[in-house]
Image (spheres, rainbow, N blue to C red):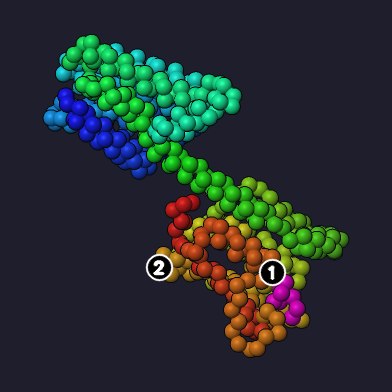
Amino acid sequence: MTDRLIWITLLVKLGVVASVASILARVVTFRRLFFAERRTARQTLALLAFFLVPLTLGVWVRFWVSNFLAADISFAAVILLGLLLGPRWAMLGGVVLSLPAVYHREYLALPFNIALALASGILGRFVEAEEIWSFTPFIDLSLWRWVRRNLRQPRVDRQFLMLFLISVMEMVRDWLAHAYPHRLFALLASHTWVQVFVWLSAPIDVGIALKVWNTLRLEIKLEEQKRLLLEARLDALQRQINPHFLFNTLNSIASLVRMKPEMARQMTVKLANILRALLKDHDTYVALRDELSFTDDYLDIEVVRFGADKLRVEKQIDPRTLDILVPSILLQPLIENSIKHGLEPRLNGGTVTLRSRLEGNRVLIEVADDGVGMGNRPATALRRTGAGIGMKNVQERLEVLYGNLAHFEIVSNPGRGTLVSIELPANLPDSF
């Protein structure tokens, strides 16, 4: 084996390691298993298969394709398995990776891989997980960090310890391959300075794979933090309760207790249903039929408060939309806004109309009233981005859940009423 071939092999091997790590990172199942906080034995075996199938094939390729020695990255693979999965799984992986070599009479491959897996597994237990993920393939930076830290305060630097021990394990492999020719694969150079680069390339191979996966790990953690933040924001929005509605309803119940006790009991039950729905840990999405059922309790209370002659409710619901999932507690703030700002100022009250229809792969939901409209404005259609806490609540929740996939619009004609339109995807966004 010439020194030139060794140089080419070292360079190509860097590309092979980076390519394999990147390809695995693109597989959804691999990501799910690899970054799971806890795995069953069956899941760990499935994860191990993602490593062993292509890498064992790479060992075979070394024998089939002349001078394509860079296909065999089993040394770095066993170390990575030991650091990330532990000694037992690494030893199993080492055994599988050694089978093609043993078949071709490299008999030391099996015991060496087992010993390598055990050593790297113990090293992985000794080093903190974050120190493993932050391990850098840039040796000069690792050496500089080590010197700088130990000049200030001498201590055991685990990052440098990993770099040193991986290089030592490569030295041991080269020594065995030199002592027992054709019994263990290694890159043996004729010049010492070239061999030093072989030793230093081992931690670089390991570090490149860790860098690729750590970048993906950080992205997943950022996405998870973003999801938790959105859930917290959404939960805060969902738990907003209009105290005026609660107080007015309790006053109405109190006034009905003596004269109409049965009606007071019914209103109490409906109020309890509303509060239960508002305060419990409900799902982010509910079927439209359940959302309409919730608004029915609210409307029944408002009809009693205002009188059936002053508040009328009409529904024009497309049956095909009833099973479509929509954000929970979506309609109640809009209906409340229609009653409070549209119908209550009118002496003779008015009508609240609920509509839904399916338009292709989108659902259109409308809340309309024939009240006084929004403000004293010219008798032309007025488009606004929102009004009041209830409107703002709904808009923010739609933005959190759907982004630009949802459309929220208000059209108000002073003296003629207000129409609130919500257009949503009939199917939930993929991110949810």
* Residue 344 lies in the magenta stretch: yes
Toward the viewer: 57 or 417?
A: 57
Three-letter amino acid code at the position of disc 2 = Gly
Callout 1: helix, strand or loop?
helix
Toward the viewer: 376 or 273?
A: 376
* 368 to 59, vertically: above or below: below
Q: What residue do we see at 34% from left, 27% from top?
A: 200
Callout 2: helix, strand or loop?
loop
| Other-residue count near label 1 (Cα within 10 Å), few / some / many at <14 / 14–19 / ≥20 | few
Q: Which mark is residue 388?
A: 1
Q: Quadrant of residue 168?
A: top left
Q: Are marks 1 and 2 in contact (CB under 8 Å)?
A: no
Where is residue 195 drawn, in percent x and y?
A: 27, 23
Where is residue 344 drawn, in percent x and y?
A: 74, 75
Residue 319 in sight here: no
* 189 to 217, vertically: above or below: above
* Residue stretch in magenta: 339-346
Magenta span dominant secondary structure = helix
- The residue at which mark 2 appears reads as 360
Q: Nearer the viewer, mark 1 or mark 2?
A: 1
Q: What residue do we see at 59% from left, 56% from top?
A: 328
Image position of 246 (left or right of 209): right
- Between discs 1 and 2, the one toward the N terminus: 2
